[in-house]
Amino acid sequence: MSGKLHDKYTREAVAKLPSRKETISTGWRSPSNIAIVKYWGKSEGQIPRNPSLSFSLKEAVTEMLLTALPHSGDGFSLEYSFEGKENEAFGMRIRKYLSNILPYFPFLNGFSLDIQSHNTFPHSSGIASSASSMSALALCICSLEEMMLRRRTDEEFYTKASFMARLGSGSASRSVFGGFASWGFIEGKDDTSDEFASALEIKKDTVFSDLNDAVLIVNPGQKKVSSSQGHSLMDSHPFAVGRYKQAGKNLSEVLQALENGDVETFIRITENEALSLHGLMMSSDPGFILLEPSTIEIISRIRKYREETGSFITFTIDAGPNVHLIYPGEVREAVQIFIRDELLEFCHDGKWIDDRMGGGPEELNIKDKK
Ligand code: DP6
């Protein structure tokens, strides 16, 4: 793995180690995000094959507490609990992640780490928990480093946290920022990078600065095909080259649309991205279908409602059957009636999550400790 920041962080890591070890704790609340331009396909080292764009959610968050206790042996040890209980599968993922990031944080050797986390959204709600949990973890580790070794400016801190979150889960790199964030190098924008995401400043008080996301739960079950499997199927996908070109073009157009207040283009691209993602899944080898009949019914109704009312509402879908209905605050009341009257019958047990754009991660006051 290489890259400008990779080199910088590994160089820094060996240059200074803590002179004194003491017990320290930190905690972060970090959100999930919903992608408008999708990341689908990656190369070695979690490098995305195309740039992506998302906004962070407000309600769907992971809260994580990390305590590091010095021990006299070599290496690090880990105790992990999720919602008060041991969680073997996620514990293993975290252990593997921590081993992978040791070249950046060699100081972790010599500590017993105790990590407790919980999500504010139901486990099988179809909201990606890896984005919120891996970003929370990366933020906690970067805070430990700050407390022990070096202070960074806010910008440097969040860039490093995004870099580290990316190594845990690509989409998590975007969750360390509030509002819109993009990840991946964008032609003509030299401050963007495949190694980390950055916040995208947009004009305040526009329809785009106040987006809502109603997550309509068609099926709360586990995904049949994981995102990782989906990404790797892109390696041999016959449409891969065309897809990466399309994503780059969609991203530039949507950035322009956000800048110009161009709702029509935003809607066109948001839906094109969602349907293209699922088109890619269907045309992979082997192909797979995550959409369900109710997903299609919901999409048709959203489009019909938009045609009839002229309202700004649109949808996107991640790697699952659930629909994210995106709309601005100004039509909130009407859209919520529409959801109740026309969409809930297609949701599993009438389940949906009323979420919206959020301001990004927050450091927990350690007194909040659960
Ligand atoms: C469809 O970030 O979950 O949500 O890097 O393998 O952890 P890994 O994949 P992940 O993929 C997200 C895919 C997506 C689109 C997106 O969020 O951009």
Image (cartoon, rainbow, N blue to C red):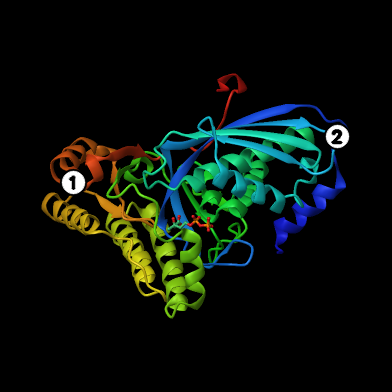
Mark 1 lies on a secondary structure that is helix
Residues at marks 2 and 1 touching, judged by CB atoms closer than 8 Å: no
Question: Relative to the observer, which residue lies in front, 195 or 26?
Answer: 26
Quadrant including the N terminus: bottom right
Mark 2 lies on a secondary structure that is loop
Q: Give the Cα distance between marks 2 and 1.
A: 58 Å
Question: Relative to the observer, which residue lies in front, 86 or 261?
Answer: 86
Q: Is residue 161 left or right of residue 323?
A: right
Asked whether mark 1 and ligand 1 are closer than 8 Å, the reply comes as: no
Badge 1 amino acid? Leu
> Closer to the observer: label 2 or label 1?
2
Outermost residue toward the bottom in this view: 238
Residue at numbered disc 2? 72
Task: Answer above or below: position of 256 versus 13.
Answer: below
Q: What is the x, y in percent for residue 163?
A: 63, 51
Q: What is the x, y in percent for residue 255?
A: 42, 57
How many discs mark residues in the rendered view?
2
Mark linked to residue 343: 1
Q: Is residue 68 left or right of residue 245?
A: right
Question: Relative to the observer, which residue lies in front, 363 or 282?
Answer: 282
Q: For residue 348, what is the image quadrant?
A: top left
Q: Earlier in the sequence, mark 2 or mark 1?
A: 2
Please tell me how crowded label 1 is: few (under 14), some (14-19), or many (20+) other residues with Cα within 10 Å: many
Outermost residue toward the left in this view: 308
Asked whether mark 2 and ligand 1 are closer than 8 Å, the reply comes as: no
Q: Is residue 215 visible?
A: yes
Question: Relative to the observer, which residue lies in front, 162 or 87?
Answer: 87
Who's the residue at 55% across and 60% down the image? 184
Badge 2 amino acid? Ser
